[in-house]
Amino acid sequence: MSPPGIIRRSLFAGVRDVSGAVIVIDTFRAFTTAAFLLDRGVSRIVLTETLDEARGTASTLPGSILCGEDGGRQPADFPLGNSPTQTDQADDLRGRTVVMRTSSGTRSVVGALRSGAEPVYAASLVVASATARAVRGYPQVTIVASGLGGTVIADEDEETAGFIADRLLERPDDPRMIDRIRAGTGAARLRTTPWIDPHDLDRCLETDRFSFALRASTDLGLVLLNRTSVTS
């Protein structure tokens, strides 16, 4: 099978007018958190663009849990923040619906779907290789590094995009990738922001921790994120 053609894009502008297979990356921390939630047995994640949309959606889904952040902070009325460490430690998640809103990742996925892309996958390092396997076979793949707030380039997302592209092109892994991310501005922000769990950085850098991919789709007006098994 020939490797796909790869288009690299970044930020909110990167999901405008996309088509075909698209991977949206948010490594720090939305799609790391989402992977941990689905691994814990959450039945589905509903992605939203705004806090008010998240609250309104949750009010129509009995038993659902709000999860996410605004400017990196967990809203006071959200039981879960955008933290893989927090979600990994939470109780009573199995079978629940999570309604998630983040400043960059969830909004970027919604934008990609709105543009008509199909399929759309959400990705981070913890599901990187599974995501690459999921889109193998498509003639062209667009990889969008969503960045900080969708407006500022994030080194960790760009590095993850490169890692996935290398997997698609069957190139060898770059052994210095994790070191570069740890030395980057995104990692420094996670280490020094007082309301971010100090363990989140290590969780986000657990490359290929999970063997499933995160596929986004629309159903009855909701943007859903579900785990998808991927064969080798």
Image (cartoon, helix red, strand yellow):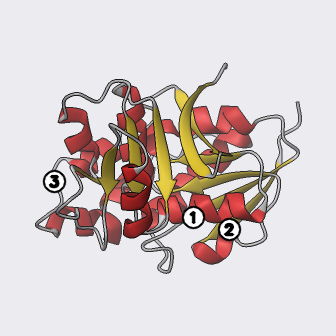
Element type at marker 2? helix
The answer to whether residue 97 of the structure is visible from this angle is yes
Is residue 20 toward the left or the right of residue 175 in the image?
right
What residue sits right under mark 3 in the picture?
197
Amino acid type shown at disc 2: Val
Amino acid type shown at disc 3: Asp
Q: Residue at x 46, y 42 (%)?
A: 45
Q: CA distance from mark 1 to mark 3?
A: 24 Å
Is residue 20 toward the left or the right of residue 42 in the image?
right
Residue 108's tag is: 1
Element type at marker 3? loop
| Label 1–label 2 contact, CB within 8 A | yes
Q: Residue at x 65, y 46 (%)?
A: 220
Q: Residue at x 39, y 68 (%)?
A: 52
Q: Count of labels shown?
A: 3
Q: CA distance from mark 1 to mark 2?
A: 6 Å
